[in-house]
Image (spheres, grey):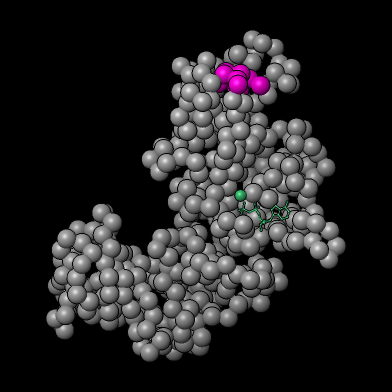
Amino acid sequence: MAAISLRNVVKRYGFGSGATPVIHGLSAEIADGEFIVIVGPSGCGKSTLLRMVAGLEAVTEGEILIGARVVNDIGPAERDIAMVFQNYALYPHMSVFDNMAYGLKLRGGSAADIRARVEKAAALLELTHLLARKPRQLSGGQRQRVAMGRAIVRSPQVFLFDEPLSNLDARLRAQTRLEIRRLHAELGVTSLFVTHDQVEAMTLAQRMIVMNAGIMEQFGTPEQVYLEPATTFVAGFIGSPPMNLLEGRALGTRFETSGVTLALPAPAPRDGALILGVRPEHCALGLAAPPAGAAAQWTFRVEMLEMLGAERLVYGRLGESAFTVRTEGTAAPALVRRSDPPARVVTAAGGGKGRAGDTRCVPLAPAAFRIVPAARSPARAHGVCARAGRAARAAPRASAPAAPRPCPRPAAASRSLPGPARRSCPRSGRPV
Ligand SMILES: Nc1ncnc2c1ncn2[C@@H]1O[C@H](COP(=O)(O)OP(=O)(O)O)[C@@H](O)[C@H]1O
Ligand SMILES: [Mg+2]
């Protein structure tokens, strides 16, 4: 097991003026034994980063350390890592046993040692009864476990996973997620896990790196990333549906946006152009009266409902802006029906259908809000850790969704969301 350091890692494909920059100076410190998920949209550079750690891709600038060693010039075989890919890459003519033993045989271990290792890994992965089968005689999930077994038998210092669950159906994915967590708890090997799936990222990660267009937007625990997104990109990418993000102007406890003035439950960190972010679950809808102590209530025009079982999504508008609220599946229709006048209320019995109407929307402060500058932080553009300012820290915490739009230029990738006192730098993961 080993720590991993990424120090200002840059990757460009090609040379000279024709070079394509893909990773733009990424730094992160990963502790020994940590399970780190690298998440971001397709094409943002996740695989490239992982392949640089594996030694399958050259590092253009910067340094990668595994343990105390700089590995930039060390070949993949000497890095003591094991990688699991999306397309398992099993040898079709070999049995499960031989697939798992192959790498060990190449390294010249004794037959008894190889058998012992393969049998131990097979037991761990519940593959013992399948050791004699060929890959074609296995289900997708079983093949996936063989690929993991092949990595485990090597007892590497680091596991690298590149979207290993993408070929599995939803149920098997959820089950395999749990198995991977159990394996990590048992083996404690430092792991980098790449995925484009935010649910996978949130459920597997001890800490996660959120990437966008070759830039690390945030490095933190799932809780930090969800509750204190460092940028509007993160706010929009993590969470489904995304955080509502309303652009507007603040004046004290009032916020003007798209034709309406919203009362804020606490004063904005400063007056002027800001983005108000509200997670869909951080609002209560259709209450007959606002809850005690509620400092604000908004008029929410309901347009559409979506019944998802345990929860219900209510789509509508605050002023002209699209806005989404998440309510409990059972509670929502009754609550919406009991909405305040006018009586054009949503009748959602049966789910999904109903007439549109206005209802009361009570933002649940202080957990509900993140009020962020509408202007891009210059500190961020220059790659410096932006500390939360005094005013921003005093601000109520808001969840704000950002539209998950790809950014044309890396430096303008997204706006900085200074949050409440941040414990670590979102770019490097180092304490600030
Ligand atoms: N060998 C290559 N030559 C040039 N560009 C590449 C090469 N490999 C990947 N890229 C580009 O690098 C970017 C990141 O790719 P990749 O790391 O595979 O993204 P992800 O894994 O996040 O989907 C993409 O725009 C891709 O087109
Ligand atoms: Mg990839």
Most foreground residue, 27 or 355: 355
Direction from residue 62 to residue 197 in the image, left or right: left
Q: Quadrant of the C terminus?
A: bottom right
Whether residue 186 is visible: no
Q: Which residue is at a point 46% across and 16% down the rendered structure image? A: 129
Q: Quadrant of residue 116?
A: top right
Q: Main secondary structure of the magenta part?
A: helix
Q: Is residue 196 above or below residue 192?
A: below
Residue range corresponding to the magenta coloring: 93-102
Farthest right residue in view: 16
Q: Quadrant of the N terminus?
A: top right
Asked whether 192 falls inside the magenta stretch, the response is no
Asked whether 95 falls inside the magenta stretch, the response is yes
Direction from residue 266 to residue 73 in the image, left or right: right
Give how far across and how far down residue 141 sits, in percent. Answer: 46, 33
Whether residue 87 is visible: yes
Most foreground residue, 368 or 415: 415
Q: Which residue is at a point 63% across and 36% down the rendered structure image? A: 83
Q: Which residue is at a point 71% across and 51% down the rendered structure image? A: 6
Q: Is residue 60 above or below residue 399?
A: above
Most foreground residue, 312 or 135: 135
Give how far across and how far down residue 298 sits, in percent. Answer: 29, 81
Q: Which residue is at a point 38% across and 89% down the rendered structure image? A: 259
Give how far across and how far down residue 128 sits, in percent. Answer: 48, 17
Direction from residue 204 to residue 190 in the image, left or right: right
Give how far across and how far down residue 262 sits, in percent. Answer: 35, 84
Q: Is residue 335 above or below residue 225?
A: below
